[in-house]
Image (cartoon, grey):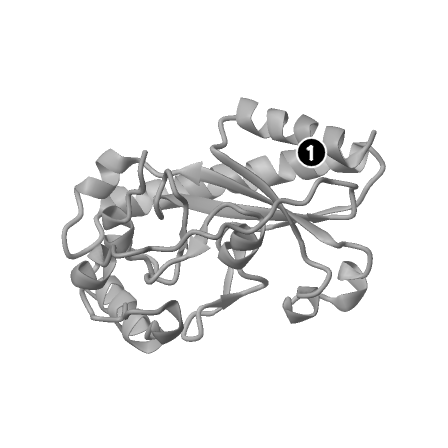
């Protein structure tokens, strides 16, 4: 099977499973930045990025703080993505290739907001969207209302091209952010303000984990 056919077969499987986004990125030049053993990454040169849409109804319930309903939804979405990545990884392995599924949410350092790798960065490389002012991946149709998971592999696959779009004149996330962490550019995003707000939400028993989602509710895309 060639890379184009492999790509179409996997994409069809993912959409049949209920996923909303599928893209492939070349990671050969950035994998040295991942918090994963170089030995494990040695032959893995691509990342398959999968996205699942969040419930707009649940998001719309939020105003200036996350809700318990959103927190539950957030956990279920991540679980669904992890299972989808595991299933796709197994399919890839059965075809004779390597596959390493990276959890949808497994933060190593909350204050620096770092994980084994950045799903949103891989998503941008895979053409699923661009990094918005809210420091999240923004898709043209879904906005930031989705979650991501990634599978690293050596399977021959077509590589998607990064999006050339950006947030344009939209600044809804800047206005709604409860702690003022969002600025004009993603590079100016204030991680400390964001983390302090997440800790506050947890202390107030709004949620049991460091979760917000207020800006996600405002970032709705075109569809």
Q: Which residue occupies 76% across, 67% down?
A: 38
Residue that mark 1 sits on:
7
Q: Quick check: 19 left or right of 208?
A: right
Which quarter of the picture shows residue 131? bottom left
Of 14 and 201, which appears nearest the observer? 14
Which quarter of the picture shows residue 82? top right
Of 130 and 81, which appears nearest the observer? 130
Q: Which residue occupies 28% across, 75% down?
A: 193
* Rendered position, 78 above or below 202: above
The image position of residue 56, as x and y in percent, is 26, 36
The image position of residue 15, as x and y in percent, is 54, 26
* Rendered position, 123 above or below 34: above
The image position of residue 13, as x and y in percent, is 62, 26
In the rendered image, which quarter contains the C terminus?
Answer: top left
- Can residue 206 be seen here? The reply is no
Q: Quick check: 1 left or right of 162?
A: right
* Rendered position, 162 above or below 16: below
Q: Which residue occupies 18% across, 64% down?
A: 178
Of 141 and 20, which appears nearest the observer? 141
Which quarter of the picture shows residue 222? top left
Number of numbered discs on residues: 1
Callout 1: helix, strand or loop? Answer: helix
- Can residue 64 be seen here? The reply is yes
The image position of residue 80, as x and y in percent, is 49, 37
Q: Quick check: 163 left or right of 92?
A: left
Q: Which residue occupies 81% across, 32% down?
A: 2
């Amino acid at each position: 099977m060639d890379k184009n056919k492999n790509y179409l077969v996997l994409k069809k499987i993912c959409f049949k499973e209920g996923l909303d986004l599928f893209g492939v990125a070349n990671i050969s030049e950035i994998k040295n930045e991942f918090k994963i053993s170089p030995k494990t990454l040695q032959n893995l040169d691509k990342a398959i990025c999968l996205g699942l849409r969040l419930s707009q109804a649940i998001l719309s319930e939020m105003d200036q703080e996350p809700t318990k309903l959103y927190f539950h939804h957030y956990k279920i979405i991540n679980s669904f993505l992890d299972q989808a990545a595991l299933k796709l990884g197994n399919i890839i392995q059965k075809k004779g290739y390597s596959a390493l599924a990276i959890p949808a949410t497994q933060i190593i350092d909350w204050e620096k907001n770092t994980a084994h790798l950045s799903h949103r960065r891989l998503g941008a490389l895979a053409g699923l969207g661009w990094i918005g002012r809210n420091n999240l991946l923004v898709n043209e149709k879904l906005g930031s209302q989705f979650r991501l998971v990634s599978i690293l592999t050596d399977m021959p696959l077509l590589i998607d091209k990064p999006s050339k779009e950006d947030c344009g004149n939209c600044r809804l996330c800047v206005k709604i952010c409860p702690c003022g962490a969002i600025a004009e550019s993603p590079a100016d995003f204030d991680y400390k303000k964001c983390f302090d707000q997440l800790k506050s939400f947890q202390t107030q028993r709004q949620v049991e984990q460091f979760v917000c989602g207020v800006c996600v509710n405002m970032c709705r895309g075109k569809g």
